[in-house]
Image: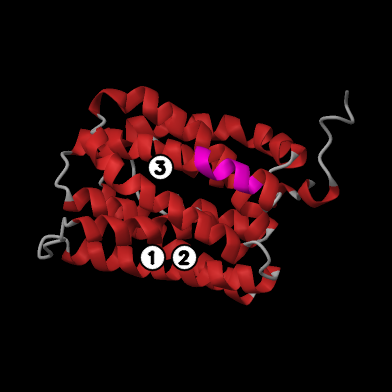
């Protein structure tokens, strides 16, 4: 039985690497409990620790757990009509991302992920600075473009959040409806991605499952902390700090 729970060599980390992994899992919980836009730091840290492609499967299982919590907590606020507009396009984007990313060499994949992360960070900075002056379109084609990009980037690097957030802001959803609708969106999207990671990319295995079991307690801590933090934290300052750290991490991924 002890051999069953023993991690393979590539997942036997130094103490400081475990600290990074635990913090990354903690951030997953915080992001899923309502503080949007910070899960990108989890993507960055785990890509540094485990490599670009391998990290996508490790993250996905933690995301699914966080999504289930978010759906339970915010379900009553879900606006299904907006999901019907966005989800089909996102599924198509996932399928495209699966075939584009499946056979990419690790170095190319990792640098592509770093570029996507930097692009997302810059987009989020730009959006935060200009959101009061921007009129985002709400036409059907806007849902199509955002959905395709979100689906592609979530398959390549679990980075759909900023694009989905812009779409929901364009739909002018109130805060609770925004969080509740996004919760179901990401749960359904991440469940749709699971077979691709298990059977196509093979980035979810028994070994990654056992690693995630060690990280999940910190996801739950993050969920509890996030619910409390949503009530007191100044989100703008927190997001800016996380985005700066994430941009630095993306450079590290690119150069590593």
Stretch in magenta: 191-197
Any magenta on residue 122?
A: no
State the residue at coordinates (10%, 65%). Answer: 133
The answer to whether residue 187 is left or right of residue 256 is: left
State the residue at coordinates (85%, 49%). Answer: 9
Up-down: is 228 above or below 11?
A: above
| Distance between the alpha carbons at the discs numbered 2 and 1 | 6 Å
Instruction: Tell me whether the residue at label 1 lies in contact with that at label 3, contact meaning CB atoms closer than 8 angstroms.
Output: no
Q: Nearer the viewer, residue 46 or 53?
A: 53
Mark 3 or mark 2, earlier in chain: 3
Q: Quadrant of residue 3?
A: top right
- Work out which quarter of the rendered image holds the C terminus and state it: bottom right
Question: From this viewpoint, is residue 50 visible?
Answer: yes
Residue 244 x, y percent position in the rendering: 40, 65
Up-down: is 241 above or below 206?
A: below
Instruction: Tell me whether the residue at label 2 lies in contact with that at label 1, contact meaning CB atoms closer than 8 angstroms.
Output: yes
Question: From this viewpoint, is residue 239 visible?
Answer: no
Which residue is label 1 attached to? Answer: 121
Up-down: is 118 above or below 43?
A: below
Any magenta on residue 194?
A: yes
Q: Nearer the viewer, residue 180 or 20?
A: 180
State the residue at coordinates (53%, 65%). Answer: 249
Which residue is label 2 attached to? Answer: 117
Per the image, label 3 sits on a secondary structure element best described as helix
Instruction: Tell me whether the residue at label 3 lies in contact with that at label 2, contact meaning CB atoms closer than 8 angstroms.
Output: no
| Distance between the alpha carbons at the discs numbered 3 and 2 | 16 Å
Classify mark 2: residues with Cα within 10 Å, few (<14), some (14-19) or many (20+): many
Which residue is label 3 attached to? Answer: 31
Mark 1 or mark 3, earlier in chain: 3
């Amino acid at each position: 039985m002890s051999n069953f729970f023993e991690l393979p060599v590539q997942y036997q980390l130094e103490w400081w690497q475990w600290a990074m992994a635990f913090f990354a899992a903690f951030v997953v919980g915080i992001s899923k409990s309502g503080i949007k836009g910070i899960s990108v730091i989890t993507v960055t840290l785990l890509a540094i620790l485990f490599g670009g492609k391998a990290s996508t499967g490790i993250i996905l299982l933690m995301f699914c757990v966080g999504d289930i919590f978010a759906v339970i907590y915010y379900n009553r606020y879900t606006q299904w009509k907006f999901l019907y507009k966005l989800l089909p396009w996102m599924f198509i984007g996932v399928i495209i991302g699966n075939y584009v990313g499946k056979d990419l060499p690790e170095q190319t994949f990792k640098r592509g992920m770093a570029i996507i992360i930097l692009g997302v960070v810059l987009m989020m900075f730009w959006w935060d600075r200009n959101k009061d002056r921007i009129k985002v379109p709400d036409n059907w084609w806007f849902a199509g473009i955002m959905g395709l990009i979100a689906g592609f980037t979530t398959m390549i690097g679990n980075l759909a959040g900023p694009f989905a957030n812009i779409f929901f802001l364009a739909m002018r959803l109130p805060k609770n409806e925004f969080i509740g609708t996004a919760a179901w969106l990401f749960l359904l999207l991440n469940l749709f991605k699971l077979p691709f990671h298990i059977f196509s990319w093979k980035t979810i295995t028994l070994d990654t499952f056992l690693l995630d079991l060690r990280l999940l307690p910190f996801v739950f801590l993050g969920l509890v902390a996030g619910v409390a933090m949503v009530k007191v934290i100044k989100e703008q300052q927190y997001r800016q700090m996380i985005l700066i750290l994430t941009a630095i991490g993306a450079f590290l991924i690119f150069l590593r």
